[in-house]
Image (cartoon, rainbow, N blue to C red):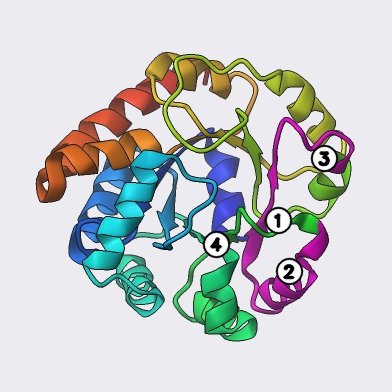
Amino acid sequence: MSRIAVAFGKEKLFIGFVTGGDPSIEKSEEFILKMIEAGAGLVEIGVPFSDPIAEGPVIQAANIRALKSGASLEKLFALVKSLREKTQVPLVFLTYFNPVFKYGVDNFFKHCAETELDGVIIPDLPFEESWEARGAADKNSVDLISLVAPTSEDRVKEIAKNAGGFLYVVSSMGVTGERDAIETDLNSIITTARAHTNIPIAVGFGINTPEQAADIARVADGVIVGSAIVKIVEQHGGGAGPHIYDYVKSMKAGMSRNQ
């Protein structure tokens, strides 16, 4: 059984996100361990890219900071390897397809397996075009995690049937970023998906308060938070660790109201 399956089997997960290398690889490791200490059950590590089309201004700026600090795929693989010596919490890359293609699809997923990375999310890779990446991921026992959006409609069934690790449900139209309210009919999307898959379902995009986390945890198996954490890094730089810990602790407490 994969680490992702084991983690979701224990409880509903808080899933935190950091941009790898913002403000440095060493600080990214510290921030990830702080999130885990505070109760994160899975961590997404963003691979810095110059054109992150699904990201709002907060994570876009973090990508630029990380690239300026010298972040690279090789350094992020080394980060995962280092983290694996300290934790067995599932770790997932969120990357765009260009870095994967440039690295070589087979080579990329081979390195994922070698460093014990558990999964990969590629927001700009349409399901219908994912056969090459899916084949390489399967060959290396790495979960290629699929996304469904409010506009996916009939495609939800096909995507859910072929999903690996967990199904990432995008809560709102547009790019990442904090939102005052989540207005999408998540119940409908999740009900449709659950009819076609047994894997866990996590919801992300826009979630930033304990109240929102509590609401999402009523219908989903995981709550994904990115921009709010990256904003803490933007505000506090290398000193963000304690602030990230407190924030994740409060979000986890919000979710626990429904467990």
The residue mark sitting in front, 4 or 2, is 4
Relative to 10, say whether 94 is above or below. Answer: below
Q: Earlier in the sequence, mark 1 or mark 3?
A: 3
Q: Earlier in the sequence, mark 3 or mark 2?
A: 2
Q: Nearer the viewer, residue 8 or 66?
A: 66
Dot 3: element: helix
Q: Earlier in the sequence, mark 1 or mark 4?
A: 4
Determine if the magenta segment contains residue 183. no
| Residues at circles 4 and 2 in contact by the CB criterion of under 8 Å | no
Neighbourhood count class around disc 1 (C-alpha, 10 Å): few under 14, some 14–19, many 20 upward: many
Alpha carbon of mark 1 to alpha carbon of mark 4: how far? Answer: 18 Å
Which mark, residue 96? 4
**In the image, what residue occupies the spot 61% across and 15% down?**
183
| Residues at circles 1 and 3 in contact by the CB criterion of under 8 Å | no
Kind of residue at badge 3: Val
| Residues at circles 1 and 2 in contact by the CB criterion of under 8 Å | yes
Q: Position of residue 237 (x, y in %)?
A: 14, 47
Dot 1: element: loop
Kind of residue at badge 4: Tyr
Task: Provide the residue designation for mark 1.
Answer: 164
**In the image, what residue occupies the spot 63% across and 56% down?**
124
Task: Provide the residue designation for mark 2.
Answer: 134
**In the image, what residue occupies the spot 53% across and 50% down?**
53
Q: Earlier in the sequence, mark 1 or mark 2?
A: 2
Q: Which residues are magenta?
A: 128-155
- Residue at the left extreme? 239
